[in-house]
Image: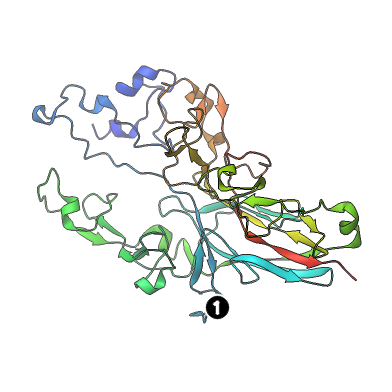
Amino acid sequence: ISGRCLFGQDQNNPASYDQGPSSSSLPPTDVTAGSYTPNYLDKFATTPANGGGDYSFLAYYTPRPPQIAAPDTSQQCASSGQCPVSQVGTFSLEGASEGKVAYIGGQAIATIRFYGWAADNQAGLKDMWIDWGDGATQQFHDERMKNKKPMCGATSECSAVPGLGCQSDKDCPPAGGKCVPTAFCTQKSSLTCTSDTDCYENGLDVGDKCAPRLTFGNSDSDCEQNYFEFTHVYLCSREDQLGDLAKCGNKKYCSDNNNQVCTKDSDCAKPGKCLTNIDMASPQGCFDETNTACRYTPRVLLKDNWGWCTGECRVEDLGSGFMGPGFAGFNKILLPNGGCYDGTGIKQINNNVLSDRPIAIKNGNVYNMCDPGQTTNNVYRPWVVFQGALQLGVAP
C-alpha cells in the first residue's frame, strides 16, 4: 500500500479516484492534496473492525501563501536589518506602515521595506513584483530567493503568523499570538503537535513523542535575517497637474484592491474594507487638486515555488456568509489559508474530473489568480497594497 501512495489517479478517468493507480496516472502533486481520501487504499475493508478505514499513514497538508510584514525601523533594532515587526500583511513606505507620506519640490526618493517569506514546506520565494504606483515596476522572476525575516534559526513561531520565528512572546507583533514551539511527532515527521498525546494512534500511546524541530524555512539554508529594501525616485510636474495624471477627486478605494472604487465596505470583496478615512491612489497615480500634489500608492506581490502568492482571492459565498474558495461555484481552487494561486502549471489533462473535485482547471480553463496585470477584477486580488499614499507637491 505504501508504494501505491506515491501514485496519483488517472486524470482522464474520473472513476479512478476510487480505484488503484493506472499506468497513465500522474504523480500526486496537486496543491489540494488532502481534500479527498482514495478509497482504493482500503477497498476491501471499509471499517476499522475489518482492518480498514485507517488513513493514519496518509499525510495531509494545506498550502499557505507567502507572508509579508513591515519592519518597525523607528525602534532600536537588534542589528542592521533585524527590526521588530510593526504590522503583518503590509510593508513600510519611508518607515510608515500606512497613511500619507508627504513631500514637496516635485521630486522625492522613497524607500519601501518588508520582510517576506514562503511557507516552511513551500520554500523558496520565486517571483516578486514591485509596482510603485506611477507606472514604474520592478520584476524578479525565477530568483529562488531566501526568506527574509527578523529572526532565523528559531524552533518557535508566532501562533497567529505562521513562519515568523520567535524566542518569546515579545518577539511577536500586535495580534501575532503567542510564541509556540514548531513541534512534530518524531515517528510521523509531517504531523504537527503540541503534546505527546497528539502523536497517539487511535488514542493509544505507541511511543511517538512530540518534539520541537527547526523547519527548513527558518534554517540558515533558506532564511536570512534582513528585510527586502527598494528605492525609487518619484516625480510630479506641471504636466501632471495639467492633465497627464487623472484627478484624484474624492475617490476612495478598497483596502486590498486600489482598482476598486468604493463608498462603503459592501462595495469591496470580503475581507477587504472601504478605506473612507485614508487617501490612496489608483495603480496609475492621480493628481490631488486640493493639495496641488501628485499621489501614488505602491503595491507588492510575492509568489513562491509552488505557485502560491500574496493577496486575497477568497470571497463570500452568496447567501451563506461563508468565506469560501473562488466565487459562486465557478472556481474550485481551495484557499482556506487565504492568498491566491497560479494554476497555469497544472496540466490541461486535469480538465476531465468529477464536478466536486477542488482543482485549478475546470472545463479546460486555466486560472492564474496571481496575474499582476489584473486591473478591474474584484475577485482576484494578489497585490499587497499600501494603505495610504506618497503625496508629492508639484515642482516649482
**Quarter holding the N terminus?**
top left
**Along the line of sight, which residue is nearer the eye, 302 or 24?**
302
Q: Quadrant of the C terminus?
A: bottom right
**Label tally:** 1
x and y, in percent, of residue 201 in the image? 14, 45
* Residue 183 x %, y %: 28, 59
Q: Where is residue 223? Give x, y as percent.
A: 47, 64
Q: Position of residue 114 (x, y in %)?
A: 57, 64
Q: Nearer the viewer, residue 170 or 392?
A: 392
Where disc 1 sits, the SS reads loop
Quadrant housing residue 371: top right
Amino acid on which disc 1 is placed: Ser
What is the basis of the colouring in this image?
Answer: rainbow
Residue appearing at x 34%, y 37% in the figure: 34
Quarter of the view holding residue 319 = top left
**Residue placed at 84% from the left, 72% from the top?**
105
Q: Which residue is mark 1?
A: 80
| Residue name at image x 51 percent, y 69 percent | 86
Q: Is residue 73 left or right of residue 206?
A: right
Vertical position of residue 55 compared to residue 255: above or below: above
351 or 241: nearer the viewer: 241
Residue 184 position (above or below residue 92): above
Q: Is residue 77 left or right of residue 35?
A: right
Say whether residue 231 is visible: yes
Indicate whether 67 appears above or below 260: below
Q: Residue furthest bottom?
A: 76
Does the rendering let one see residue 229?
Answer: no
10 Å neighbourhood of mark 1: few (<14), some, or many (≥20)? few
**Is residue 86 shown left or right of residue 252?**
left
